């Protein structure tokens, strides 16, 4: 589903952030990206739907990520950002969930009905006409996820999804993610959450993947509790 | 029944043009046109006292023009300028209360205002609250570290607020790109112009024109 070879990237105002990443993700597989702050996890993930484009090869469902293929790639890769407030920017929850579908050219009526279905699935239907800024942190997170899931991506990337969530909120999120059939890439510092939601983990350090294997083994190996 | 915001904007524009075209000295005509927003104010479900007070904010600015007339000894003309600017702002404020700001912005876009400008305005409106929260949290953090002068804190934090705003705008832009944003915001609720809007617009413009030119 995702194939990355020798990916390198540096920001204009810093040294290299990614130093030759090789990575594979199979369809339906759930993988955690672990590692300290600044190790390159988010920078790496931003390459998977072309928000950043470095040197090397990135392929999503056999499509090479280039400027010409961005639209197609972004249909396949859904990205839930760490800050839900950044992701929710339209005046109502419903409009925000419809945003991606409308960008894909789905007619407004159909987009509205699909968005409402998704909100119902995530228990947010009663918030459809509320301003997203007035939701709780957990509700914002679910609304942000709804806005991505409604686009039916084949790969779901979540960047620090447990940030600002209380323990019941984290458990609820884990249960929800485990029901989703698509491939998932979860960037997290929460080792418990990683164990609950993924089968595999890659450990990042200084822009490289130091190790890759079963989530529990990787966490134990790097003492990442 | 609520009018299409485009209809409301066109009626407002017609009214403002009619008001602006009155020559100083035509006091009776001015008073006749002034009656329109006043009647609307009392017929509409709007906070009357609040709007009457808010419209007064324009007076210090229009007083600059009125002062010239006063210096020339023409008190009637000064009052004319003040009344006309006050009533113009009152009409605008009533319109903004009858439709949401976002509806009015979208109506402006549909009437030909540059889309880029409208999108920028929409984002500014949506994120003012977020920026206010950022500013509050920075102020609180400074107070917790012993700062006492909140105005000084606000001044010194302004630069940092801009940096945070830039970070936030980059984050928002990335999130939009990830969901297929291609430079224009799609509209979830297309506007629908009905027969009632056409009738209201025709009657409204005819009424304003009659009051202005046939009186």
Image (spheres, coloured by chain):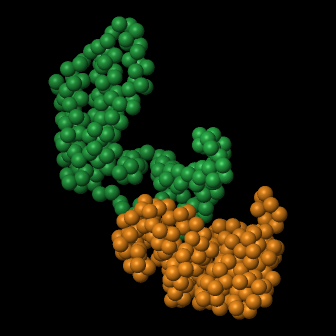
Q: Observer-nearest residue: A152 or B148?
A: B148
Quadrant the N terminus of chain B occupies: bottom left
At which x and y percent is residue B194?
23, 55
At which x and y percent is residue B137?
58, 54
Q: Residue at x 56, y 63 (%)?
A: A86
Side of B112 where A29 appears, left or right:
right
At which x and y percent is residue A147?
48, 72
Chain letter for the part of the structure drawn in orange: A
* Residue B178 appears in the picture as rendered: no
Side of A113 where A158 appears, left or right:
right
In the displayed structure, B43 sits above or below B119; it is above
Side of A219 where B77 appears, left or right:
left
In the displayed structure, B110 sits above or below A179; it is above
At which x and y percent is residue A182?
56, 86
Q: Residue at x 59, y 81 (%)?
A: A155
Q: Observer-nearest residue: B195 or B2?
A: B2
Q: Residue at x 62, y 74 (%)?
A: A160
Counting labels gives: 0
In the displayed structure, A180 sits above or below B143; it is below
The tint chain B carries is green
Quadrant the C terminus of chain B occupies: top left
Q: In which quadrant of the rendered view does residue B193 lie?
A: bottom left
Q: In which quadrant of the rendered view does residue B51 lie?
A: top left
Q: Observer-nearest residue: A115 or B212?
A: A115
Q: In which quadrant of the rendered view does residue B53 lie?
A: top left
Side of A134 where A63 appears, left or right:
right
Q: Residue at x 80, y 60 (%)?
A: A14
* Residue A13 appears in the picture as rendered: yes
């Amino acid at each position: 589903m995702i194939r990355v070879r020798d990916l390198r990237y540096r920001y204009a105002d810093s040294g290299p952030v990614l130093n030759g990443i090789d990575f594979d993700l199979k369809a339906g597989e759930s993988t955690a990206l672990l590692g300290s702050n600044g190790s390159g996890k988010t920078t790496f993930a931003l390459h998977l739907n072309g928000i950043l484009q470095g040197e090397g090869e990135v392929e999503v469902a056999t499509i090479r990520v280039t400027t010409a293929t961005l639209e197609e790639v972004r249909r396949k890769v859904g990205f839930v950002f760490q800050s839900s407030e950044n992701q929710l920017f339209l005046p109502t929850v419903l409009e925000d969930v419809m945003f991606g579908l409308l960008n894909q050219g789905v007619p407004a009526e159909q987009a509205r009905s699909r968005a409402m279905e998704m909100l119902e699935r995530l228990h947010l239907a009663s918030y459809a006409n509320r301003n997203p800024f007035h939701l709780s942190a957990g509700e914002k997170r679910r609304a942000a996820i709804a806005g991505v899931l409604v686009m039916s991506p084949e790969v779901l990337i979540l960047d620090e999804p447990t940030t600002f969530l209380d323990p019941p909120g984290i458990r609820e999120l884990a249960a929800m993610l485990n029901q989703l059939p698509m491939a998932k890439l979860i960037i997290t510092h929460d080792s418990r959450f990683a164990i609950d939601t993924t089968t595999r983990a890659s450990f990042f350090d200084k822009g490289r993947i130091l190790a890759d294997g079963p989530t529990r083994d990787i966490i134990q190996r790097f003492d990442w509790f | 029944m609520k009018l299409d915001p485009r209809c409301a904007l066109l009626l407002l524009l017609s009214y403002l043009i009619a008001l602006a075209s009155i020559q100083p000295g035509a006091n009776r005509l001015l008073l006749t046109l002034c009656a329109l927003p006043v009647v609307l104010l009392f017929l509409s479900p709007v906070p009357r006292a609040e709007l009457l007070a808010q419209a007064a904010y324009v007076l210090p600015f229009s007083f600059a023009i009125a002062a010239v007339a006063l210096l020339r000894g023409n008190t009637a003309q000064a009052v004319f300028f003040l009344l006309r600017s006050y009533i113009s702002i009152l009409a605008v404020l009533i319109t903004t209360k009858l439709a949401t700001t976002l509806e009015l912005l979208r109506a402006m876009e549909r009437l030909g205002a540059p889309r880029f400008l409208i999108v920028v305005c929409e984002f500014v409106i949506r994120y003012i609250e977020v920026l206010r929260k950022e500013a509050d949290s920075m102020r609180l953090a400074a107070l917790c570290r012993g700062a006492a002068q909140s105005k000084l804190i606000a001044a010194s934090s302004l630069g940092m607020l801009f940096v945070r705003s830039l970070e936030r705008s980059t984050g928002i832009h990335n999130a939009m790109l990830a969901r297929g944003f291609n430079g224009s915001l799609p509209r979830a609720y297309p506007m629908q112009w009905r027969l009632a809007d056409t009738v209201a617009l025709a009657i409204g413009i005819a009424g304003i024109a009659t009051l202005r030119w046939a009186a």
